Amino acid sequence: MNTLRTLLLIALAGLFFNTGYAQGWERVYHGFNSGNPNDGWAVVSILPLPDGTFMLLLDSSHDPDPDTIKLATIDENGILLSEKALLFNEEATPMDLTATSDGGYALITTRKLIKLDAQLAPQFEQDLQMLDPGKSFWCQRVVESNAGLCVVGRKTNPTAGQGFIACYDLNGNLLQFNDWGLPVAMNVGSACVTPDGGVLAVGQGYDGATFNAQGIVATRFNADGSNVVWEKIIYDQGISRTASSVVPAPGGGYLIAGSRVSRAYALKIDEQGDMLWERDYWDQPGLEEALYNIRSLSPLPGGTGYWSVFSYADNQSGAQPLLAKMDLSGDIQFHWRKNENLDFSAETGLQALADGGCVFGGSISEFVTSLTRGTPFLARFDSLGNTFLTGIAGTAKGDLDGDCIAEVDSLLEGIVILAVSNGQYAGSANIGSQGTYFIPLDTGNYQVTILSPGGPLWSFCPDTLSAAVLAQDTTFDIDFTGFYNVQPIDSIYGYVFEDYDGDCIKDDFEPGYPNWQVSVALFHMGTFVFEATTDSNGYFIIPSPAGITNEFHGFISLAPPPNDGLDCAVTCQQSYDVMFGDSATFQALFGVHCDSLAPYPLVETSIATNALRPCTHSFVHASYCNNGAVTAENAELIITVDPALEVVNSNVPWSGVNGNEYRYELGDLLPEACGDI
């Protein structure tokens, strides 16, 4: 994927047919990242507006200027209508967004409350850090009660954490600031408005004395946060609980969601905070994954259930989101997960809609200029969980005989498919194990290219195709085939010669050296070793090596004959890396310069490798010779391996290991004795 270079990113473009509010869709918003290839954005919050459009709160996860957040509006089909950047004089992480009763909006960052008018112009800004300057503040949710705007979160000092609630009127005047929750390691999950206009906040912590596990605390406030109506703590000894979300339950009471002993967990309480039922979601029918948390809830306006976002463990990508629709008893009716890797954190947005559907968003990971960055992603579901998928899909499979007809599914697995529009990067995908790919794209015309894994052996039929994406549709059958040009090797040959002029080319006036041992090690689906000896002219040849094709790679090394009384230094390459490419032969020219042996032991070594690639087995070839006229007694060879590499095995057992140093006891080396490992 590093083959993606510094490609500019396109902005959103194109018109979509208006098919009604209930129509599902999926959108990937590359346009937010344009201008900086390392930029990354994620949807934090989704707010439905009265005219059927949506407002998005977006966070920049990789922006070099972390003091910028964005508000954007999209229409009912997910098409970008406008965006506005909000600049701060300090690092700002957006946390929540809500509409206000005066037609404006309120958003919070980790430490500030910002009130905006209907045109998104700032009206006031309150720094909650100033309410208790000795503490560090982390705002979690903002809601509008009957009294005004109430912010809940946590404040910490180096030794303790505490929940807080701060309420302001719509002009920014402080109404009340109070602590709440458990006294030890308190973390605040969420809050909601109660039916009578008050506030219910939930979180988790310890009391420091009564119980030894993390418990959930639910605190019911009046409208301005000045009085606690009731507070309930749900805990069991040795059983840890967390609360990530709370919403009013249809028919009365509240549903709290989070985890219990690292399992997704929900409990329902009545209007007085007494538990009605609780359940966890570890093993679910039809799900291979273990669900270990519920991140967010959004009740259906019709009172029939909830949309929810679970966390599940993915072996390759870590925590991943699973969207589910639940009935009033908490049973999962159906679920949805996205194939591409979604960045999943507290920034994942969820909003149930009046027609029984929902809008769900976050960010989808993309690999650009060797970095991973997030691109905003939204999906609109109807009440049955259906959604459209807009983009380009197809297959990329292996062609075994060069006729441009696919025969093998998995030959091209992992290769990148790249979509470009007007010379600018639009999207990419990796070919899966079944030879399929999908690139989410907006409407428009694209050039779709399969990126060659390198080397002259690959050819494609062809490597670039044109495709048009229509409104709310996926363009299928953009298919590629790749042919690997395999042919038998005719011969491996070359010379060992006195290179008088040092140009590494054998000239007529340069004599060859006889009886040198040439060793060829080749690798592909196994290891093959071939040997030859130079003739009186220094020439060697391995004709038609059995079973070897141009798929193989490896190296050639040589050793002088024993007891010839010469000390020879290789003037060019000590060994050759063998890459056949499209050729059926390989030539290796070993230029040397020889003098009489030194009158003492002289052990010289060389080391070579065919290739080093991540997550791939490679071979390291170490050679040694005593080029002195005296025996080298008790000789040892120590090979130091880079700490980033893992040594699997050796054809010669090592005598000892010290960290990343591998020691071999060679014993007594006679003059001109050589060996290799």
Image (cartoon, helix red, strand yellow):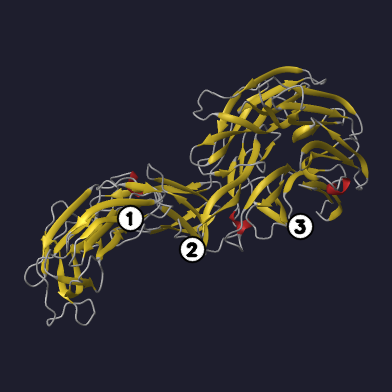
x 84%, y 55%: residue: 122
Q: Residue at x 80, y 43 (%)?
A: 99
Label placed on residue 90: 3
Residue contact between numbered discs 1 and 3, judged by CB atoms under 8 Å = no
Residue type pointed to by label 1 = Ile
| Mark 2 burial class by Cα count in 10 Å: few <14, some 14-19, many 20+ | few
Q: Is residue 455 visible?
A: yes
Which mark identifies residue 638?
1
The residues bearing labels 1 and 3 have C-alpha atoms spaced at a distance of: 53 Å
Q: Nearer the viewer, mark 2 or mark 1?
A: 1
Is residue 12 visible in the rendered image? The answer is no
SS at mark 3 in the image = loop
**Residue carrying label 2:** 5
| Residue type beneath disc 3 | Glu
Left or right, 516 with reference to 274: left
Front of the two marks 2 and 3: 3
Q: Do the residues bearing badges 2 and 3 touch, measured as CB atoms within 8 Å? A: no
| Secondary element at image label 1 | strand
